[in-house]
Image: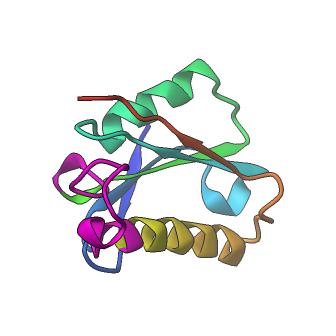
Amino acid sequence: MAREWALPRAPHAGQPVLTAGAPLDRAAAAVILVHGRGASAGDILSLAGEFFHSNVAYLAPQAAGNTWYPFSFLASLDRNEPFLSGALDALAVLLENLAAAGLPAEPSGLDVFHQKR
């Protein structure tokens, strides 16, 4: 069953982080699933069922407007700011939360899926 909490910092502040699998306080490892442009946290979290392990926490942050940054990854970095930095910051916050829950970075995973629209 998916649980939810929110990202604390702009421009993705207030966006949900869906979770499934083991609660952080009981997880042996964590996987952060990052959705692609136009997709959602719920879309990517559905993949957790394909490789589900009962002792793993799965976290899927939601980007504002279903996109982590507004322009192509080929655009200049400045053109995608502040969204690009906000996306990286959102991932950093998730990693901080994992560390605070006692999960070391080594057994954690980060899966990013990108699709062209």
Please provide percent x and percent y for residue 105.
77, 63
Please provide percent x and percent y for residue 94.
54, 67
Q: Residue at x 39, y 65 (%)?
A: 87
User: Magenta span covers which residues?
Assistant: 65-85
Q: Residue at x 33, y 63 (%)?
A: 76
Examine the structure image and report whether residue 109 is included in the region drawn in magenta: no
Examine the structure image and report whether residue 84 is included in the region drawn in magenta: yes
Looking at this view, is 50 or 54 the one in front?
A: 50
Looking at this view, is 27 or 110 the one in front?
A: 110
Q: Residue 12, can we see it?
A: no
User: Magenta stretch mostly in which secondary structure?
Assistant: loop
Looking at this view, is 65 or 43 the one in front?
A: 65
Q: Residue at x 76, y 71 (%)?
A: 102
The quarter of the picture where residue 8 lies is: bottom left
The quarter of the picture where residue 92 lies is: bottom right
Q: Residue at x 67, y 78 (%)?
A: 100
Looking at this view, is 109 or 30 the one in front?
A: 109
